[in-house]
Amino acid sequence: MKEKIQELKQKFNTELDAVKDTKALEDLRLVFFSKKGLISDLMKELGKVPNEQKKEFGQLINGLKKELNDKFDEKKLELVKLEEESEINATEAYDESMPTRCACGSYHPITLVQRDLEDIFKSMGFDVEDYNEIVDDYHCFEALNIPKFHPARDMQDTYYLSTPNQLLKSHTSAAQNAIMRKYGDALKKQKRPIKAVFPGRCFRNEAIDACHENTFFQMEGIMIDEDISISNLIYFMKTMLSEVFERDVTVRLRPGFFPFVEPGFELDIQCLICGGDGCPSCKNSGWLELCPCGMIHPNVLKYGGINTEEEPDKYTGFAFGLGLTRLAMMKFGIKDIRVLNEFDLNSLSQFVSK
Ligand code: PHE
């Protein structure tokens, strides 16, 4: 028995020495350590040994098992390390000086359009405001005259967080109330009109296709003071759009319904491609729908702390919600909205501001 143990040890050592990779090591493991392997065979022979020697041989076999196991593990570590190293050496070295496919970074088309608009609005005296993406039901709906169960909510189904009452804002109008509260004092005490734009990412539960995305950008604007009327709205929209498109644009207002404006409009611009004659871009109508807007609803002004019960009509204002994503698509001739969220640097780097 002792000889057999000795022989097995020697056989293991020689074979282990010859092993050059992890695959051969695995074969060796099967030969020695598996259920039907040589060590198991040896254990079986223990049964034939006279009782008084069983203890001694049992201990010897266990010692052998441990010794071989340790050697096996040591060899395994060594081989794995070697194989990893050779794999690293075999891969092509990273050359920092190589030009990348997209040689220099560029701004996202939406960022470009957003910055253009911010500059235009700043030059007309508007403040640019930032606002949260996660909002509560009150700011996104109730404060905008959209009570619970109002059908207008169907158009703005969005993503609700597991935290109660928290949702991803479905439109930038969700910031109106906060902005009114922020600047309300300056309006009343310093007679400083509220003029603010607030760009932001919006979310809606949409089936995605070339024209619809669940994530898109808008830029909201409000102006509130005494005696603000629809003519102010038309003036600002026309000036801003002429700047954006770098030419004089003709606009028209059609009635449109949004619970937070009264009256509400859809603002169209005359098609820039055909000049109003009708072409495929404007679906032969001569007009492009661009921007919902309207006079801020009295309830919204009240919820924002602007008008009081005593003087419910003191201040008036207009609001508009420009689709930044749509504007970027128009400006850069992007036909598929999905391009904007795909983050493919090769397509996105084609757009540069003029
Ligand atoms: N928030 C509206 C929407 O996303 C757009 C809008 C803004 C309409 C401001 C009127 C005034 O559908």
Image: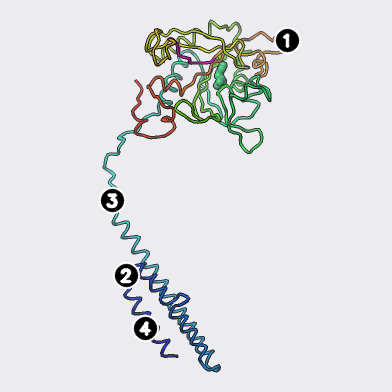
Q: Which residue is mark 4?
A: 10
From what the image shows, is residue 8 above or below residue 158? below
- Majority secondary structure of the magenta segment? strand
- SS class, disc 4: helix
Quadrant containing the N terminus in the rendered view: bottom left
In whole angstroms, how far apart are the C-alphas of marks 1 and 3? 76 Å
Q: Earlier in the sequence, mark 1 or mark 4?
A: 4
Ligand 1 sits in quadrant: top right
Q: Residue at x 55, y 94 (%)?
A: 52
Residues marked 1 and 3 touching at CB (< 8 Å): no
Which is more toward the observer, 182 or 200? 200
Mark nearest the camera among 1 and 4 is 4
Q: Residue at x 48, y 76 (%)?
A: 35
- SS class, disc 2: loop
Q: Earlier in the sequence, mark 3 or mark 4?
A: 4
Mark nearest the camera among 1 and 2 is 2
Question: Horizontal and vertical percent for residue 231?
Answer: 53, 5
- Dot 4 amino acid type: Gln
Residues marked 1 and 2 touching at CB (< 8 Å): no
Q: Which residue is mark 2?
A: 20
Q: Which residue is mark 3?
A: 93
- Dot 2 amino acid type: Lys
* Mark 1, other Cα within 10 Å: few <14 / some 14–19 / many ≥20: few
In whole angstroms, how far apart are the C-alphas of marks 3 and 4? 43 Å
- SS class, disc 1: loop
Q: Is the residue indicated by label 2 positioned so its CB lies within 8 Å of ligand 1?
A: no
- Dot 3 amino acid type: Ala
Work out whether residue 193 can be spotted: no
Name the disc covering residue 310, or none: 1
* Mark 2, other Cα within 10 Å: few <14 / some 14–19 / many ≥20: few
